[in-house]
Amino acid sequence: MKDTFKHKGMRNQLAQVVANKGIIDEKVLDGIRAIPRHLFMDSSFEAHAYQDKAFPIGADQTISQPYTVAFQTQLLEIKKGAKILEIGTGSGYQTAMLLELGAKVYSIERQKELFKRTSLFLPKLGYRPKRLIFGDGYKGLEEEAPFDGIVVTAGAPFVPKPLLAQLKIGGKLVIPVGENNKAQIMTLFVRTSEKEFTKKEFGEFRFVPMLENKN
Ligand code: SAH
């Protein structure tokens, strides 16, 4: 596993590309400058690692596009020490971004193969989530709730009720909502009281589908 000045230079350029597309949160852009994305991908894709594109990571899954990771993270407005739940650990790139921002991270992955691989990989880079869980993200993580933020990194056909229920008052859920094989609408829910939520939509994105159960 090698990270070089050349890679760092490409990351600075990638951060600029993402900034030009409208990301203004400097901490998020610093995250892009810091995380060695090429190490999160199959080495055969290394040349593509610093393009603003999604790529396959095995088990029919993808590492999200950097702009998308930045967009979702920016919406969470993470403060240091915030307790964040991620649904869809995948390559661990989004997990690393949350950790770069000083969050305490819990992340659920339903594919055993990816769960195992990423559980071994992240600590090698010095990234230490509080917990990585092999499970079904539709259920959230009741025993660790409530959360300051929950981010879903797969396309959800509907908004799972447990995720809304596991937010603190003032907590945020960032979730791309829409059917498989269609674009999803990036949606932000903020819990304003025990029973009330505000909802705001942010346009179309494309994700691999959120599937039920474990695999
Ligand atoms: N955050 C990842 C994105 C990976 S793509 C990254 O930065 O690389 C979405 C991931 O969500 C896939 O790994 C997929 O297996 C996972 N996933 C799909 N449905 C899920 C569910 N119900 N619970 C947990 N993870 C799920």
Image: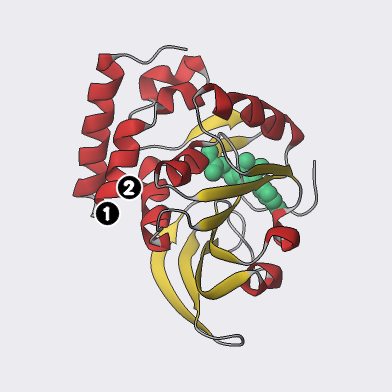
- Would you say the residues marked 2 and 1 are in contact, meaning their CB atoms lie under 8 Å apart? yes
Other-residue count near label 1 (Cα within 10 Å), few / some / many at <14 / 14–19 / ≥20: some
Mark 2 residue type: Val
**Position above or below: 163 against 73:** below
Residue 128, how many percent across, how many down?
55, 35
Where ligand 1 lies, by quadrant?
top right
Q: Which residue is mark 1?
A: 25
Residue at point 62%, 56% (across, down): 180
Q: Characterize the local packing of mark 2: few (<14), some (14-19) or many (20 or more) Cα atoms within 10 angstroms.
A: many
Query: Residue 126, image x and y in percent?
Result: 50, 27
Residue furthest toward the front? Answer: 81
Q: Is residue 64 visible?
A: no
**Would you name the residue on which mark 2 appears?**
28
Q: Nearer the viewer, residue 122 or 139?
A: 122
The answer to which image quadrant residue 150 occupies is bottom right
User: Which coloring applies here?
Assistant: secondary structure
